[in-house]
Image (spheres, coloured by chain):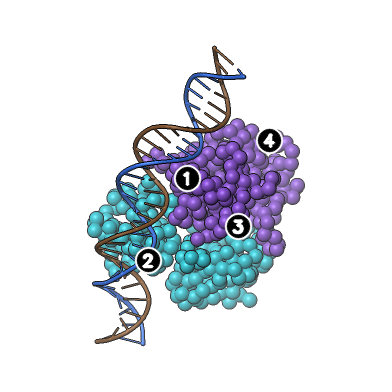
Chain colours: A purple, B cyan, C brown, D blue
Amino acid sequence: MAEFVGTGPSLRAVPFGTGTTEPIGLLSSHQRSQIADIATSLQCPRGEVIYREGSNAQSVFIIGSGIVKLFRDLPSGKRRVMTFMFTDDVFGLAQTGHYINSAQTITAATLYRIPVAALANTLRGDADLAVQFLCKVTHELRSALRHTAIVTRRDALGRVTMFLRMLEQNAPAEQDSTIEVPMSRLDAANYLGLSLEAVSRALSQLERGGIIAFKGRRSVRVLDRMRFDTIAAAL
Amino acid sequence: MAEFVGTGPSLRAVPFGTGTTEPIGLLSSHQRSQIADIATSLQCPRGEVIYREGSNAQSVFIIGSGIVKLFRDLPSGKRRVMTFMFTDDVFGLAQTGHYINSAQTITAATLYRIPVAALANTLRGDADLAVQFLCKVTHELRSALRHTAIVTRRDALGRVTMFLRMLEQNAPAEQDSTIEVPMSRLDAANYLGLSLEAVSRALSQLERGGIIAFKGRRSVRVLDRMRFDTIAAAL
DNA sequence: CGATGACTTGACTTCGCTCAAAGACAGTGG
DNA sequence: CCACTGTCTTTGAGCGAAGTCAAGTCATCG
């Protein structure tokens, strides 16, 4: 069943107990192969729908690489992006019976698909592994709270700035202070609870103010870290 | 060490795997006493601060009874309520080293206080228990997503209605369609990302429309379930 | 019964949404 | 290589809903 390549699935989070506050890889190589044994690996192109809301939730996914969005389409036609998930994130766990949202790749991605039943079994047989998953879900809970903190802000400028900061933390800058924005303005807007236009305006405003500079539309460099952080600081 | 009375700490959530979608008590009596052994029970009056943001996070708490709010105070003087926690909920886990928010009781409460280190140990020795905690945190993740869904709405009326619905689900109506609102308007507003006035206006509007009726200020009865649900339905 | 705090209501301002149109970019095929 | 086309993005003008400021009402507890 295992057809994984490379190192296999991993989880990235802040572990319990240790003094560490930076997220690290949680699983031992034994644990990784343990999961690989019950997982199937998938190569998904950009834009691939992984599952749709309402369908039967039989699998949990771990991201080997790439970016995925979880979203819901509302009767009004609006779309809400609940979260973006990155390498070593888990999704599909917070479902009961049926998926409550849809999942779609934003970039090409490698996914590990794990049947819930098999995962539950494995976890019940390995307390350490179960604790690792607990760490990971706790980590995602923190992310969800951060998301709430972002959308609770009233001002578009602040939300967008916090969003950029979040992206920066998820994908540590390879270049100096350069932040990649892999999703469309619309996806960002749907995540931030803003209109597409408001996102665009906020970004323009940051650029006009000399706080950031664009390098193409999907890449931003922070010029004035001081003011950037001030705006991002929870108002 | 154990000084618990009655049945001891429990966790309430939707379990994995089973077809159930209603939250149930997760722990066996053995597991409950296992946790009771490493826990201290506390009786807190209404308004008691359990911990403050920034302080050292050494304990995890399980609520035996009562209601607790988790919140952050912002530099601007505004306060954001991240979540309300009820009987059989866990809090303090999503912290790394230092608490990122403050916890305070809203009603008198019984709490079980568990040192993180001891809990981590116990979990590593009991895979089943670890999985139960995983269920619980997953459950809280769902709640956090629901919260985000609420505050992402633009209209005060919808947010308040969804909030009432949430309260109803957390504390199943003893009377027919009567919802207890145990927190102040201000706490509710801080949770909903609205001004206190907006909450008040929305409630008045629901009452004027004949959709709800007040019985005192902290108790509401749903008169027109149909319209109530329509408004609450994710816009 | 008076006082303090919680809640409601009203008037004005602000900021983001909507609608509308123009401007950039990427991929395609000539 | 370049023009073409559809999509994504930016920018502008006007409207509406929630925030703020400011009174006024209600309730609860001494």
Give the residue number, with chain letter if any, for mark 2.
B185
Q: Is residue A122 visible?
A: no
Q: Nearer the viewer, residue B4 or B86?
A: B86
Tell me if residue B45 comes above or below residue B181 in the rendering: below
Tell me if residue B111 comes above or below residue B200 in the rendering: below
State which mark lies toward you, 2 or 3. Answer: 3
Give the residue number, with chain letter if any, for mark 4.
A1
Q: Label 3 to label 4, Cα distance in Å?
A: 51 Å
Where's the N terminus of chain B, which quadrant? bottom right
Residue under the image location 65 percent in, 65 percent down: B97
Residue under the image location 51 percent in, 76 percent down: B43
Give the left or right position of residue B189, taking residue B43 as reference: left
| Amino acid at pointer 3 | Met
| Amino acid at pointer 2 | Arg
Give the residue number, with chain letter if any, for mark 1.
A201
Query: How far from the left and from the top, in percent, is residue A9?
Result: 68, 43
Tell me if residue B96 comes above or below residue A114 in the rendering: below
Query: How far from the left and from the top, in percent, is residue A93?
Result: 56, 47
Give the residue number, with chain letter if any, for mark 3.
A226
| Amino acid at pointer 4 | Met
